[in-house]
Image: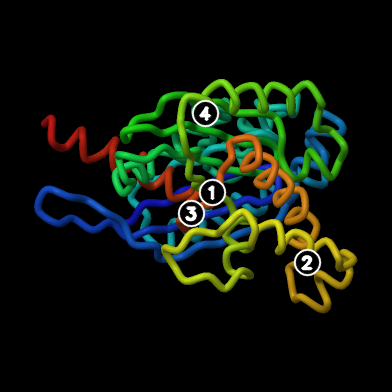
């Protein structure tokens, strides 16, 4: 059995095809194929509140390709979610209809809180030390999702319109930064210490660049040092000398700034970087939906 997850983000569009593994009472998944297409829908949505004809054509072609791949891989169920860029684009809803007609894919534009819930459906809290407190940070192109975990439970969760593409386009607002600061301060002040959990393509790349061992957290000092190192290179040299992809070399700097700022506000000394994201959460959502139904039958 295979499931597919489509994440239409502000920076990139992803397709994850996963094999579903059933073991007695548990169901898990193994990643089979992951495809990432850097469409940068956020550049249109945050500046013009409209996805352009050019980007629309590229998105439809991408969805047609994803549909063909799902057919070839014999995917039995899928979910496709669009986040920040499509939320803000005035033509987002009409695009959903157009994609259904031309690519045969049903897309749901999800609000920020649902996006956060999908990401957290990876059940990372089950592997956490229940005696410790965590700030879960997911940084995307258009938004940052935050959740506070304590005693294996979500204490508070919120989505903020601060993201890497939004910052590059100068579309982040001071009042939103202030709201995020107040949220962090309000919900972390009662805890003596907070540990970070970071997800998203940029923190994964930063962790790789840090050369830390798997399951070892990235320290605030190491992250700050990495930021200073990357920032000492021009965009061109981050691509040509450091070998970063074109669509990663620019967004990695504002991503660093978001993580560093949040870690400062919450006095976080270490951040864990599990290799999960929105597409993993979508697959887990499908498992929860389908196998819960199966058990109830």
The earlier-in-sequence mark between 3 and 1 is: 1
Label 3 residue SS: strand
Q: CA distance from mark 3 to mark 1?
A: 6 Å
Image position of 60 (left or right of 275)? right
Viewer-proximal residue among 42 and 187: 187
Q: Are marks 4 and 2 in contact (CB under 8 Å)?
A: no
- Quadrant location of the N terminus? bottom left
Residue at image point 68% right, 33% down: 86
Q: CA distance from mark 4 to mark 1?
A: 16 Å
Q: Which numbered tag is attached to residue 198? A: 1
The earlier-in-sequence mark between 2 and 3 is: 2
Q: CA distance from mark 2 to mark 3?
A: 21 Å
Vertical arrangement, residue 72 with respect to residue 81, above or below: below
The earlier-in-sequence mark between 2 and 1 is: 1
Vertical arrangement, residue 156 with respect to residue 25, above or below: above
Image position of 125 (left or right of 105)? left
Q: CA distance from mark 4 to mark 3?
A: 18 Å
Vertical arrangement, residue 219 with respect to residue 185, above or below: below
10 Å neighbourhood of mark 2: few (<14), some, or many (≥20)? few
For label 3, the residue is: 272
Residue 32 at x, y = what percent? 40, 65
Label 1 residue SS: strand
Q: Which numbered tag is attached to residue 238? A: none
For label 2, the residue is: 229
The earlier-in-sequence mark between 4 and 2 is: 4
10 Å neighbourhood of mark 3: few (<14), some, or many (≥20)? many
The mark lying in front, picked from 4 and 2, is: 4
For label 4, the residue is: 188
């Amino acid at each position: 059995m295979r499931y597919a997850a489509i994440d239409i983000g502000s920076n990139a569009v992803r397709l994850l095809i996963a094999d579903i593994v059933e073991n007695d009472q548990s169901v898990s998944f193994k990643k089979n194929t992951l495809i990432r297409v850097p469409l940068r829908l956020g550049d249109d949505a945050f500046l013009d509140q409209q996805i352009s004809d050019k980007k629309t054509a590229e998105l439809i072609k991408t969805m047609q390709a994803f549909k063909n791949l799902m057919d070839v891989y014999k995917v039995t169920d899928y979910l496709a979610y669009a986040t920040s860029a499509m939320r803000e684009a005035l033509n987002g809803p009409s695009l959903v209809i157009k994609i259904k007609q031309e690519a045969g894919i049903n897309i749901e534009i999800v609000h920020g809180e649902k996006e956060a819930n999908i990401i957290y459906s990876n059940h990372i809290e089950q592997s956490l030390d229940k005696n410790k407190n965590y700030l879960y940070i997911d940084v995307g192109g258009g938004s940052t999702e935050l959740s506070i975990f304590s005693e294996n439970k979500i204490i508070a969760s919120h989505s903020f319109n601060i993201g890497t593409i939004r910052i590059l386009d100068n579309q982040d607002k001071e009042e939103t930064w202030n709201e995020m600061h107040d949220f962090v301060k309000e919900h972390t002040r009662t805890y003596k210490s907070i540990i970070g959990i970071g997800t998203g393509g940029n923190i994964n790349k930063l962790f790789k660049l840090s050369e830390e061992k798997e399951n070892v957290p990235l320290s605030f000092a190491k992250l700050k040092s990495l930021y200073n190192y990357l920032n000492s290179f021009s965009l061109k040299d981050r691509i040509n000398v450091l070998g970063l992809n074109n669509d990663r070399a620019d967004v990695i700097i504002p991503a660093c700034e978001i993580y560093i700022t949040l870690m400062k506000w919450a006095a976080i000394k270490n951040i864990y970087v599990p290799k999960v994201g929105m597409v993993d959460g979508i697959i887990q959502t499908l498992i929860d939906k389908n196998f819960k139904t199966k058990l109830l039958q």
